[in-house]
Image (tube, grey):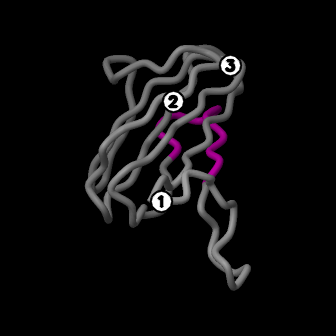
Amino acid sequence: MDKRIRAYEDDGTTKKFQTLTTTSPGAVSTAITSSRIMITSGVQANFIEFGDNPTATTSSFVIPAGASLQFNFVSGQKVSALSHNGSAHVTIVDMD
C-alpha cells in the first residue's frame, strides 16, 4: 500500500486537501469523501467540529497550534474550524 499523500489525483484534477481560514466563526469545509483525514493546525490552536452541518465553537475539540492529528471520518461529512485567537488556518488532508 502506497503511504504517500498526493495533493492531486493521477489525472491532476481532484484536490486531496482543503485549507480553511478560521478568522470567522465556524469556517466550514466542503463535504469530504474519505474514511480517514489528517488535520494540521497552523500558528494558532483551533476548535474543530465534524458533522453534516457542523459549527465549531469554543466548546469543540481543540487541535493545538502546529499539531497534526489523524481521525477516522464519516465520508460525506464536513469539518468546521474556529481559531482560538486571531487569524489562523487549518489544512484537511484526505488520507484514503
For the residues marked 1 and 2, what is the alpha-carbon distance in whole angstroms? 34 Å
- Please provide the residue range marked out in magenta: 18-27
Q: How many neighbours does mark 2 have within 10 angstroms: few (below 14), some (14-19), or many (20 or more)?
A: many
Label 2 and label 3: CA atoms lie apart by: 10 Å
- Residue at the spot 58% in from the left edge and 20% down from the top edge: 67
Where residue 35 appears, x then y in whole percent?
32, 56
At a point 69% along the width and 61% down the height, the residue shown is 7
Residue 21 placed where, x, y %? 66, 40
- Specify whether 40 is left or right of 49: right
**Where residue 93 appears, x then y in whole percent?**
56, 49
**Residue at 27% of width from left, 49% of height from top?**
51
Q: Nearer the viewer, residue 68 or 3?
A: 3
Q: Which residue is mark 2?
A: 82
Above or below, 6 relative to 23 = below
Residue name at image x 39 percent, y 66 percent: 33
State the residue position of label 3.
Answer: 86
Q: Is residue 46 above or below residue 56?
A: above
Residue holding disc 1: 1
Mark closest to the chain's N terminus, 1 or 3: 1
Tell me if residue 90 is in the magenta stretch.
no
Q: Amino acid at mark 2?
A: Leu
In the image, is residue 84 above or below residue 7? Answer: above
The answer to whether 96 is drawn above or below residue 38 in the figure is: below
Callout 2: helix, strand or loop? Answer: strand
- Amino acid type assigned to the residue bearing label 1 in the image: Met
